[in-house]
Image: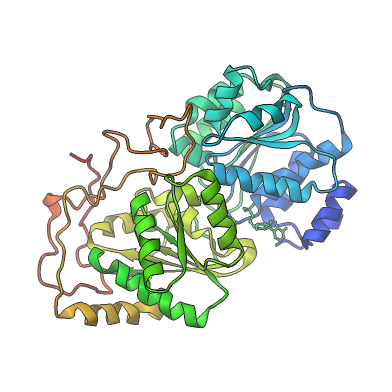
Amino acid sequence: MTDTLYEALPLAAPIQRALAEKGYTHPSPIQAKAIPVLLQGRDLLACAQTGTGKTAAFALPILDQFASNPRKPFRRGVRCLILTPTRELAVQVMQSFETYGKYINLRIGMVFGGVSEKPQIKNLFQGLDVCVATTGRLLDLHQQGHVDLSQVETLILDEADRMLDMGFIRDIRKIAAAIPQNRQTLLFSATMAPEITKLANNLMNDPAEIRIAPQGTTAEKIDQGVLFVDKGNKQNLLIELLKNRKEAHRSELSLVFSRTKHGAKNLAKKLNSIGIEADSIHGNKSQAARQKTLDLFKQGRIPVLVATDVAARGIDVKNITLVINFDLPMESDAYVHRIGRTARAGESGKALSFCSLEEVALLREVEKLIKKKVPVDSDHAHHAEAIQALHESGARVEKPKNGGGGQRRGGGSGGQRRGGQARSRKGGNPGGPRAGSRRNSGGGNNTSGGGNGSSSVSNRPQRRNAGRRKTSNP
Ligand code: AMP
């Protein structure tokens, strides 16, 4: 947090009241920088990690406009449109608007796929001050004439890097084209990849630029570590870690990332079967079921949540003190997003990554992005050793299989669908399998090493270059 006091910022009294109630006394760095710029009505290009308070950074100035300029939105009209990559993030953003805008008379609504469109159409009919939407459903409703985008005063792209990753660039362009050019445009992204800058140049008018952390830098307060473990022993290592944690950190939450939907589901099932309460969220679950699980997790009634990347994207839960990358992500950017689920709101947290022989190259890519080495986790190395001892007798080092476990880019979960169909686009298919879209972690038969009789679990990478190549799956 900064030294400035919220009271010193020129925000309308109803907003100050809601902030005081929420216990926010000082703006976070992104808030301190963005709020004054946005109150002037400028466009903004902001590079900020998750957990930095970016939602309030854009929500507060928008709410201030509504407080000082109250007018009823036109029928089917939207005054502020926020685009998010996932339904979960949409819910999160809407909840923030509701919290900070508690004392302002506002109409807030959401538009996203995977649920009936009727209530959304009804809500839009009366007009909305704030509409939080995913792109596919919004375009559908726009094409059907249920939403009038010509009234939009402010367009916000939240987690724009993720939207591009998921292949929504054309949707974004179509939506932006339907909005008047004299709008205010805000773009928030965790990384400032060249495509983001290009998009910003197309959509924005002389934006102010704010970078809260250098590209790809992970939150400083997150204690990161890696444990090298054979693929076949990851489950045992996870159980060992969570069992010990159950004793020591009863009230704290753990978030485990799995690369595939099935992996997430099976892991949660396995944990439950041995007495560790867990549930999963992934794209095969209905929106309602995902939200219910998230709520139970937030309340601490489920201490362990296993999630895929896309489904976990909007998770903003304060007590997550441990993030475990059961599988390393195919895209190194996702690592930053994943571990950003801990150490929220200035608290500290731990992020442990399990790295198998096949994943060493992925770990190196992560290290290149965050510009530092992830150290072997000394606190938990003994767990890895315990697993090693357990398995020594029957130790079996699996050769990397062709296909690297069938991982798909984009986590294969939870993204929006349009017209009930999984979209087939470059950069991932969040809704389901897509022919020809697989990228494996390498480690195909060309890099077959590892079958050398070495132990199942080690604290060192056994083979540095294994899995370096990204190839398409046969
Ligand atoms: P975000 O990066 O917007 O997802 O926010 C991360 C977390 O920080 C959320 O739980 C917010 O409620 C919390 N937060 C945001 N701004 C502040 C603030 N100024 N003081 C304390 N907590 C905050």
Which image quadrant: the C terminus?
top left
Q: Is residue 253 left or right of residue 284?
A: right
Q: Position of residue 318 (x, y in %)?
A: 61, 63
Q: Is residue 118 left or right of residue 184?
A: left
The reply to whether residue 387 is visible in this rendering is yes
Task: Name the image quarter holding residue 59.
Answer: top right
- Looking at the image, residue 224 lies above or below residue 181: below
In this view, which residue lies farthest toward the left? Answer: 452
Which image quadrant: the N terminus?
bottom right
Q: Position of residue 179 (x, y in %)?
A: 66, 21
Between residues 203 and 102, which one lies in front from this camera angle? 102
- Looking at the image, residue 418 lies above or below residue 30: above
Q: Is residue 131 left or right of residue 200?
A: right
Q: Quadrant of ligand 1?
A: bottom right
Residue beneath the point at 56% across and 50% down: 291
Q: Position of residue 379 (x, y in %)?
A: 41, 80
- Looking at the image, residue 32 lies above or below residue 246: above
Between residues 453 and 98, which one lies in front from this camera angle? 98
Between residues 367 and 148, which one lies in front from this camera angle? 148
The number of numbered discs placed on residues in the rendered structure image is 0
Q: Is residue 473 left or right of residue 327?
A: left
Residue beneath the point at 25% across and 63% down: 231
The reply to whether residue 4 is visible in this rendering is no
Residue beneath the point at 24% across and 73% down: 457
Q: Position of residue 144 (x, y in %)?
A: 59, 17
